[in-house]
Image (cartoon, helix red, strand yellow):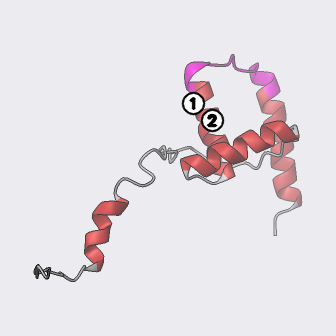
Amino acid sequence: MGDNKQVNINPISPNSFASLDDGINKSKPATKQKYIGQPTRISVDAHEELAEVIKDYSYYSGMTQKEAIVHILEQYFKENKPKQRPQEVRERADKRIDRRRKKYRV
């Protein structure tokens, strides 16, 4: 009745878990690109359904919501190159931005 089987138990080192973690978050895209200048804050009002889709996308891709939105925008603009604004309009916007920076400069 008693088949005595010998069982070898080997201790597990913390480094052995590193190979298990290699597959996690591999789908996370590299959104770190080198841009010129300071980042600009953009605030957008979106419908609740769209916000939920962004939350779901960021959750399953292992990104923050901010990273997910930036990633989605980068992918969109890789495929769709928008026409640039006229130079005079760009200069006008730059002047407005400069005035705001001077106003809030410490």
Provide the secondary structure element on which disc 1 rests: helix
Image vertical order of residue 77 relative to residue 59, above or below? above
Kind of residue at disc 1: Gln
- Residue at x 63% of width, y 48% of height: 58
Residue 25 highlighted magenta (yes or no): no
Which residue range is magenta in the image? 78-89
Return the residue nearer the eye: 49 or 97.
Answer: 49
- How many neighbours does mark 1 have within 10 angstroms: few (below 14), some (14-19), or many (20 or more)? few
Q: Is residue 52 above or below residue 82?
A: below
Q: Which amino acid, by three-letter code, is at mark 2? A: Ile
Residue 68, percent across and down?
A: 63, 45
- Relative to 82, is 28 on the left or the right? left
> Which type of secondary structure does the marked residue at label 2 adopt?
helix
Q: Residue furthest front?
A: 1
Q: Residue furthest top?
A: 83
Residue at the disc numbered 2: 72
Cα gap from disc 2 to disc 1, whole angstroms: 5 Å
Residue plotted at (45% across, 44% down):
27
**Residue under numbered circle 1:** 75
Q: Residue at x 82, y 64 (%)?
A: 105
Q: Are marks 2 and 1 in contact (CB under 8 Å)?
A: yes
Classed neighbour count for the residue bearing mark 2: other residues with Cα under 10 Å, few (<14), some (14–19), many (≥20): some
